[in-house]
């Protein structure tokens, strides 16, 4: 099909004669697409930040003893405090198929009690202690920056070794001093520093790097916690939701400790996968909200385009009448109006999309220059499918905006139009 260059020249001439009107009309469409691009890009950046944080942590659940029993069960009275024990770990491994890994955790100065008075040479401070195991660095969102993490031999032999947070290092050691291999005392007990960590969370709080981590069994025996465990970290096999493992472990512990299955609050729990599902649902809502706001703005712009095209038809009534008198068909008249409307919306929308993407790229470049993220905000972007969807919305908006003016132009009576003053 040959392009009707004369018709396009005429359209450009008409738009050029009304520059201000055309610019103001196009701005509504431009702003709608620009807002859509920026809002979706910002939503994606938040999503990327959360997903990046969560992907470092396995699909897992935390379980701990919380409240005394409230229901008498199997002849046992109410008010019993269920205590988690180290023996529960092997029992759960052998009896609960939905659990692939389970770690026992104890602590000093985190869930009550005083932090450990910590001394190195003439420097000292009070820091909480957390028990850990080999392979738990990602669960605690830790990145080793010096030395190494706790390993299997440390666990098996209950070695008195420790990894310290960067803020602990700043307090105990002089600037430039190597902490690896140094002996520090925790509440009078000597431990050798084997590693220094910093938080790998995109939005860490100050206390996360003010802790000292030691092998959990070492903590239990050194700090008189042999008879109990503070909490369990449960990791299910691939393909099983953490909620399933959490429920199965609680059910097993209830039966093992003779607790009524309906006794609420005896065991506390936190399930990371469920939290992730909730947050991901929030991002879906943000994207839907972004589309609603942007489409509303685009439609407002399209209505403006339609109103301008009605004015254009009114101004060109004599011209349209003359065209029809000379043999122009209604379809050619409609095509002229539709093309002009679609041109305005397409060009304005394209520039809105390009400017929006350039803004996101600029923000991303600034973030990359400063470490790649700003808290939970990471890599703002708009994917190709979204851009195609925006183009489709634009095209539909342009067509809708031109329908009424085009119908009005096609209905012009040549005789009446030529008499129009």
Image (tube, grey):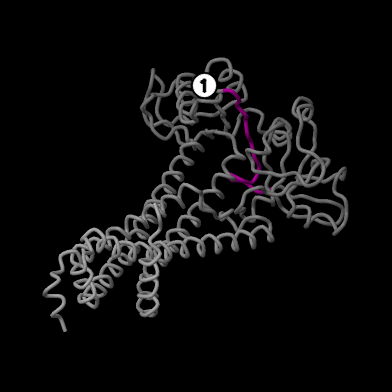
Apparent side of residue 390 relative to residue 117 in the rendered image (left or right): left
Apparent side of residue 157 relative to residue 389 in the rendered image (left or right): right
Image quadrant occupied by the C terminus: bottom left
Is label 1 in a helix, a strand or a loop? loop
Q: Position of residue 296 (x, y in %)?
A: 32, 61
Q: What is the total number of numbered labels drawn onto the structure image?
A: 1
Q: Is residue 336 magenta?
A: no
Magenta region:
100-115
**Which one is nearer the viewer's eye here, 49 or 166?**
49
Can you say whether 21 is above or below 216 in the image?
below
Residue farthest toward the bottom in the current orientation of the protein: 421
Residue 122 picture quarter = bottom right
**Which one is nearer the viewer's eye here, 257 or 99?**
99
Residue 292 picture quarter = bottom left
**Which one is nearer the viewer's eye here, 293 or 227?**
293
Q: Residue at x 51, y 62 (%)?
A: 354
Q: Residue at x 40, y 71 (%)?
A: 12
Residue farthest toward the front in the current orientation of the protein: 326
Q: Which residue is mark 1?
A: 98
Residue farthest toward the top in the current orientation of the protein: 94
Q: Position of residue 297 (x, y in %)?
A: 34, 64
Q: Position of residue 283 (x, y in %)?
A: 44, 49
Q: Position of residue 68 (x, y in %)?
A: 45, 33
Can you say whether 413 is above or below 180 in the image?
below
Q: Is residue 101 magenta?
A: yes
Residue 91 picture quarter = top right
Q: Residue at x 83, y 40 (%)?
A: 192
Can you say whether 252 is above or below 401 in the image?
above
User: Quick one: label 1, few (<14), some, or many (20+) residues within 10 Å?
Assistant: many
Q: Residue at x 52, y 33 (%)?
A: 63
**Which one is nearer the viewer's eye here, 338 or 214?**
338
């Amino acid at each position: 099909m040959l392009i009707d260059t004369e018709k396009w020249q005429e359209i450009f001439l008409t738009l050029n004669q009304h520059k201000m009107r055309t610019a103001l009309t196009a701005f509504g469409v431009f702003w709608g697409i620009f807002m859509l691009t920026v809002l979706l890009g910002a939503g994606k950046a938040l999503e990327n930040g959360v997903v990046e944080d969560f992907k470092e942590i396995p699909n897992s659940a935390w379980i701990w003893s919380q409240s005394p029993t409230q229901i008498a069960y199997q002849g046992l009275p109410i008010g019993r405090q269920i205590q988690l024990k180290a023996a529960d770990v092997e029992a759960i491994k052998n009896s609960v198929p939905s659990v692939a890994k389970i770690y026992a955790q104890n602590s000093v100065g985190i869930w009550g009690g005083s932090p450990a008075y910590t001394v190195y040479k003439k420097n000292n401070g009070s820091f909480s202690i957390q028990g850990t195991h080999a392979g738990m660095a990602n669960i605690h969102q830790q990145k080793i920056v010096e030395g190494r993490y706790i390993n299997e031999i440390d666990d098996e032999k209950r070695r008195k070794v420790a990894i310290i947070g960067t803020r602990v290092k700043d307090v105990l050691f002089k600037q430039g001093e190597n902490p690896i291999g140094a002996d520090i005392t925790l509440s009078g007990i000597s431990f050798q520093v084997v590693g220094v960590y910093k938080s790998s969370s995109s939005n860490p709080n100050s206390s996360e790097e003010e802790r000292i981590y030691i092998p959990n069994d070492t903590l239990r025996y050194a700090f008189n916690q042999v008879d109990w465990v503070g909490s369990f970290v449960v990791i299910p096999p691939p393909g099983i939701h953490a909620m399933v493992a959490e429920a199965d472990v609680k059910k097993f512990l209830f039966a093992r400790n003779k607790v009524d299955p309906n006794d609420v609050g005896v065991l506390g729990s936190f399930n990371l996968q469920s939290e992730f599902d909730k947050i991901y649902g929030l991002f879906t809502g943000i994207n839907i909200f972004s589309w609603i706001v942007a489409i509303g703005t685009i439609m407002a712009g399209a209505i403006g385009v339609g109103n301008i095209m009605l004015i254009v038809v009114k101004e060109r009534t004599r011209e349209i009448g003359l065209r029809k008198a000379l043999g122009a068909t209604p379809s050619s008249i409609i095509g002229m109006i539709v093309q002009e409307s679609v041109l305005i919306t397409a060009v304005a929308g394209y520039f809105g999309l390009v400017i929006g993407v350039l803004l996101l790229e600029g923000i991303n470049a600034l973030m990359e220059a400063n470490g790649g993220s700003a808290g939970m905000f990471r890599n703002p972007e708009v994917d190709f499918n979204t851009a195609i969807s925006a183009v489709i919305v634009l095209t539909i908006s342009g067509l809708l905006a031109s329908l009424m003016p085009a119908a009005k132009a096609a209905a012009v009576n040549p005789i009446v139009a030529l008499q129009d003053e």
